[in-house]
Structure formats: structure tokens, C-alpha cells
Image (cartoon, grey):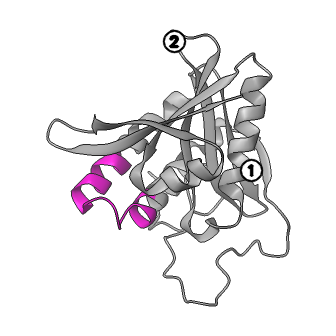
Amino acid sequence: MACSPSRSACAGSRYRALPAERHTPGASRDAGDGQGPPAIRPLRPADLDTIGALQEASILALGAATYSRPQLDAWARFGWHYRRKLLEDEGAFFVAERPDRLVGVGGWSPDSHAHELAWLRYLFVHPESTGRGVGRQLVETVEAHARGHGKAGFRVWSSLNATGFYRALGYRRLRRGRWPVTGAIEIDYVLLAKDA
């Protein structure tokens, strides 16, 4: 059984998948309020379905103001297919964890041509946990881990809705690009860089 945001639990996981929240102004956006920051730990095989659901919820909720529904659906499907590669790639991937659920995921991979560069990849925060420092905490963890492996600079292909987040963390825009998610659907992205 596949796990998606509409299911209450993910196969093989003790975590529940949460649907994208319909936020009420003034209401708490993260059930983890008062618990401090989430724990960050390495990604495990048992997390894959849960992070697939988290990634899908993030794309559909946070990208809705920027991308069309066909673009969002294609991007989310691609992520479901790609998530298993996270355990095979060089570099490292991490999850942000509350006691009862995962609230974020992100990692890095080495550049295949420039030894000193690391690529930030697969960074998603569940919509219920945005604006709480989870993304920043993941990026800081990923960058520190990559620096510990000799990486001095970072690159990331950012969705248009996330460029402000990366710029607030010291990334600068290099250029805009277009990613062919499928043969018929493309998504505009921005390449950003940060040097140590």
C-alpha cells in the first residue's frame, strides 16, 4: 500500500501522514509548539513512504500559488518515484522528527565535476510546520554535514515559491532554468548558490 497525504498512516511506518492543513488565522500551525525544535536524524529506509507523503503535501500546498495543478501533480509523482534513490546517492539525507511524525526532509549530494561543491536536494517541510524554523534547521544540518566532508560551496535548484527562503539563508541567484518533469510538463526553477 502506498502512502499519500490522504491516508492516515504509512505502510511500514509508525508515523502518520498528515494532510495539508486548511490554516485558520491565529490558530497554531504546528502541533509541536512548546516542544522546541524537532530532532534531526539521518533518513532511514522505513521513512521513505512517509517522506513521499510529506513531499507531496508540501508541493501541493506550498506550490499552489506559483504552479498549475498539472505541474504540481507531475512534480509530486516524480518525487514519489525518486524518493528511493535518496538512500543510494552519495552525500546524506536527514529528517526533522516530532515524537509522532516527520515534519521535514532534506539532504545533499556531491557535485560530479566540482569536488568542493555540494547540491542541496529534496528539501521539503510539511505545510503544517512551515514558518517554524524546520527548513532552516534542516539546511543548517545539511550544510554542516557537507562541510565536514570537505564541501565549501552549495548549489540548489529552488522552486519559485522557495527562493525567498534560500535567499534569507544567504543564497544568491545565479540563473533561472526550466525542468522537464515529463515530456509535456515543465517547471520553472531558480539556481541559487552559497559559498562558505
Sooner in the amino-acid sequence: mark 2 or mark 1: 2
Name the side, left or right, on which 67 lies relative to 8. left
The image quadrant where one finds the C terminus is top right
Tag 1 secondary structure: helix
Q: Nearer the viewer, residue 84 or 155?
A: 155
Residue at (70%, 46%) from the top-left corner?
138
Residue 183 vertical position relative to residue 32 in the rendered view, above or below: above
Name the side, left or right, on which 43 lies relative to 32. left
Which residue is identified by label 1?
Answer: 137
Residue 128 is at least partly visible in this image: yes
Instruction: Please provide percent x and percent y for residue 133.
Output: 71, 60
Residue at (43%, 35%) from the top-left corner?
82
Tag 2 secondary structure: loop
Provide the residue span drawn in magenta: 59-77
Task: Give the CA separation, mark 2 to mark 1.
Answer: 26 Å
Residue 73 is covered by the magenta coloring:
yes
Residue density around tag 1, few if under 14, some if 14–19, many if 20 or more, within 10 Å: some
Residue at (48%, 66%) from the top-left corner?
7
Residue 60 vertical position relative to residue 42 in the rendered view, above or below: below
Q: What secondary structure do most residues of the magenta stretch adopt?
A: helix
Type of the residue with mark 1: Gln
Instruction: Please provide percent x and percent y for residue 55.
Output: 49, 52
Type of the residue with mark 2: Ser
| Residue 118 falls in image quadrant | top right
Q: Nearer the viewer, residue 123 or 174?
A: 174
Name the side, left or right, on which 178 lies relative to 140. left
Residue 176 vertical position relative to residue 149 in the rendered view, above or below: below
Residue density around tag 2, few if under 14, some if 14–19, many if 20 or more, within 10 Å: few
Which residue is identified by label 2?
Answer: 112
Instruction: Please provide percent x and percent y for residue 117.
Output: 61, 19
